Amino acid sequence: MARPSSQQIRDYSRMRLLIVGCFFSLVWVALWARAGFLQIVRGPELAQMALRQHVSSEMEMGRRGEIVDRNGLVLAQSVEFVGVYARPNEMRDIPAAAATLAKILEEPAKDIAKKLASNEHYVFVEHKIGDKPAAKIKEAAIPGVYLVEEYGRSYPNKHLAGQLLGFVGQDDDGQEGLEQAFQARLAGKKAVFTVQRDASGRKLYLDDQGREVVTNGRDVALTIDAQVQYFAEEALARAVVENKGKAGVCLVVHVPSAEILAWANYPFFNPNAFDRKKPEQWRNHLALDVIEPGSTMKPILIAGALQENVVKPDTQFFCENGRWNYADTTIRDTHPYDTLPVDRIMRYSSNIGAAKIGLLMGANRLHAYFERVGFGERTGLPLPGEARGLLRSAKQWAKIDLATASFGQGVGVTPLQLAQAYHVLANGGLYTPLKLVRDPGGERYATQADHRVFEPKIVATVQQMMREVVEEEKGTGVKARIAGLDTGGKTGTAQKAGKRGGYVEKYLASFIGFIPAINPEYLVMVMVDEPEPCHYGGVVAAPAVREVALKTMAYQGKMPETVKLAELRPQTQPSAPAAAAAAAAPATPAAA
């Protein structure tokens, strides 16, 4: 066989070189093409993927402000929890992510998938998860899913002032009470910022904002004194339970400052467990319930009549021996009376005598005094849903309406409005808006400015009459007496209106006390709804007012030397307000 020529060998070598060259050229082109594809086409995506391994957007929640009493005792605070949120635009596989989260959080996958399908920049998946679920989510490292430190609301004193404080929802937004009223002030602001993690997993902030963007909410300081609040709740619960009542309220006001020291509703409400309660249980009865005041209207009537010079304290009225047919309506007194002067009409609480005073005064003048003490208008305190009451215009009053309004029927007020009106009588005749917040942040809540309603000499006369209600023989408020200290007040036994009109055999028993009777330091109001079998305010509510007054004076160091030590009941509550409030008051099965 002939050997290949040199030319053939050279041609063969060239062919091999050409093939190898073409191969390497193709490889080179492919590499460049791939590099170009990765750089140009998938470059942004890959860069984002790489960045996500070390850089992420995280959210941090500002802490919600605290609500504290006048002494700084915490009534509502925020505690740390862990939440889960997602950034849908960073997620690769939403159904898979939803399935993983559903298994960890023990929730339906479809519900989570619905949240993740949102067009929002970020969405919360779940608030307040436990440590174990948080650890599992962290381990799963689901793209676009993040853990965040957040805060949940806690009420360390349980039911103490529960209806007043209200509560927050799942998103930490105020839903009821002061939590709702001060939402803008209490709420912390959330911040989203970029962080990079080093090899050890430590956070490095990539911008100048970082944590400085997070803003904590501001605190709210109340005029409430937690210890006085405890006294009020304890006495109120006892009054309702022992008299088989349906519900009750108690308000304590420091008269010179117009500051509310206690705001109690019964049955109690624990905001820590709001989701296990019915809306009726968190209803703030003091501000929302519209009631007919009954005989507690008489001091306001008599003060107006004295100021208008319609009557004098000794002006006599025939009280019809307990039964008076007027304008096709029968007006009755609890006991039959013949002729009574104005001061005894107050002391014995004669409806007939009050009606005759009102008729002499006239609709326009009586209505004007009702308006000036605050009836028919909200007090303006920061209370969501506060009722206006029901005060028809004087032009709409028939003669019988004027007569019955004089003893508190046909006029609707809230317990808070009634306390505001009595504060005028306690405060020398000056209308000064009641205060609930010590540091209102510059906001003004009152609907009426300070103004004079009654002259000081008129108020002094009425205070003396109210003293006789408690201190004199046959006064209806004798059970509010405090040995060694003159106490004043007025009883109320208001028959309740029926749903179909008229009145039914159900009553609201009330007593509003001035301690001391002349130039009072404290105003204490107690109301018990539908007590049985006795329904008189002087029997049901007056003892609770006395109890609250005694304990408050002792606690605040205002107990006069003349008061006998025997008046004080043994103290059963712990000395620290927080510890005292943490336990339910004695004989309070509904406390929770």
Image (cartoon, grey):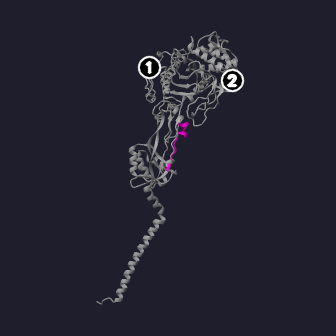
Instruction: Give, as a single range, the part of the protein colored magenta.
Output: 179-192
Residue 58 is left or right of residue 409, and the answer is left
Residue 466 is left or right of residue 100, and the answer is right
Q: Is residue 368 above or below residue 103?
A: above
Q: State how far apart marks 1 and 2 are (Cα).
A: 51 Å
Q: Residue furthest left?
A: 1
The residue shown at (49%, 15%) is 564
Report if the CB atoms under discs 1 and 2 are less than 8 Å apart.
no
Q: Percent x, y for residue 16?
A: 37, 81
| Residue 459 in sight from this viewpoint | yes
Which amino acid type corresponds to the residue marked 2 in the rendered image?
Answer: Trp
The mark that comes first in sequence, 1 or 2, is: 2
Which part of the image, by quadrant, shows the C terminus? top left
Give residue 315's mark. Answer: none
Q: Percent x, y for residue 334?
A: 58, 14
| 190 magenta-colored | yes
In front of the other: 88 or 476: 476
Label 1: state its secondary structure: loop
Count residues near mark 1 (Cα–Cα under 10 Å), then give few for <14, some for 14-19, many for 20+: few
Q: Nearer the viewer, mark 1 or mark 2?
A: 1
| Residue 114 in sight from this viewpoint | no
Q: Is residue 209 above or below residue 31?
A: above
Q: Percent x, y for residue 149?
A: 45, 45
Q: Which residue is mark 1?
A: 570
Q: Percent x, y for residue 263?
A: 53, 28
Q: Which residue is mark 2?
A: 397
Residue 420 is left or right of residue 576, and the answer is right
